[in-house]
Image: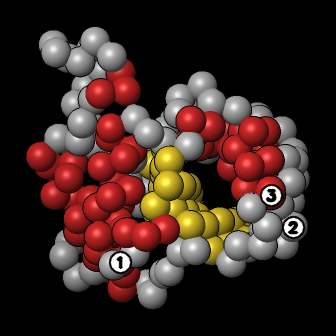
Amino acid sequence: MDLYILRHAIAVERGSPGYDDDSTRPLTEQGAAKMHKAATGIRSLGLEFDLVLSSPSLRARQTAEIVVRELGAEGVLEFSVHLEPGGSTESLIGSLVKRGPLRSVLLVGHEPYLSGLISVLLTGGGDMATTLKKGGLVKLAVPMLRHGRCASLEWAVTPGQLRRIAGEG
């Protein structure tokens, strides 16, 4: 399986007035605009997904919706509480394994959860230092998905690199 991991785009700052519930923070106008350009880069790479699984938090949901609209793949978008901040990587992996064989999956979520997930899949533990920028994308090759060391890093791109791939600087 090709497992792609995407951090949500730039959102309203934590603690901003009117957003007492962290899960309701939306993307900023600039964050949405940059994500549209980055999603064009994702399309330019020729990526297709059997499943796009997103945190239900508004900023992740909006990021995932931008990507699936750009790819014309709205029918593959689902949401999982396991991708919320503080979610369980074990439960997430277990739910993916139960689905059976998938060729290509995109996970959309939050930091530091996503870096922890990457660390578990690459090293078997949670101690690998990773920085995933807002709107950054990682590709892991996963021959047999399990909770533990089972993947290899294929590549990682920043949101700026995705926008350049799209020819939109």
The quadrant holding residue 24 is top left
Residue sitting at the far left? 29
Q: Residue at x 12, y 46 (%)?
A: 29
Residue type indicated by callout 2: Met
Mark sitting earlier along the chain (1/2): 1
The quadrant holding residue 39 is bottom left
Quarter holding the N terminus? Answer: bottom right
Q: Residue at x 28, y 12 (%)?
A: 20
Q: Position of residue 99 (x, y in %)?
A: 74, 61
Q: Residues within 10 Å of mark 2 (few under 14, many from 20)?
A: few
Task: Report the front residue among 97 and 132.
Answer: 97
Q: CA distance from mark 3 to mark 2?
A: 9 Å
- Residue named by callout 1: 71
Q: CA distance from mark 1 to mark 2?
A: 26 Å
Mark 1 touching mark 2, by CB under 8 A?
no
Q: Secondary structure at mark 3?
A: helix
Q: Position of residue 76 (x, y in %)?
A: 48, 68
Q: Residues within 10 Å of mark 3 (few under 14, many from 20)?
A: some
- Residue named by callout 2: 144
Q: Is residue 56 depicted above or below 133 in this figure?
A: above
Q: Residue at x 48, y 42 (%)?
A: 55
- Residue named by callout 3: 97
Residue type indicated by callout 1: Leu
Mark 3 touching mark 2, by CB under 8 A?
no
Q: Is residue 29 depicted above or below 18 in this figure?
A: below
Quarter holding the C terminus? Answer: bottom left
Residue type indicated by callout 3: Val
Q: Is residue 3 depicted above or below 149 in this figure?
A: below
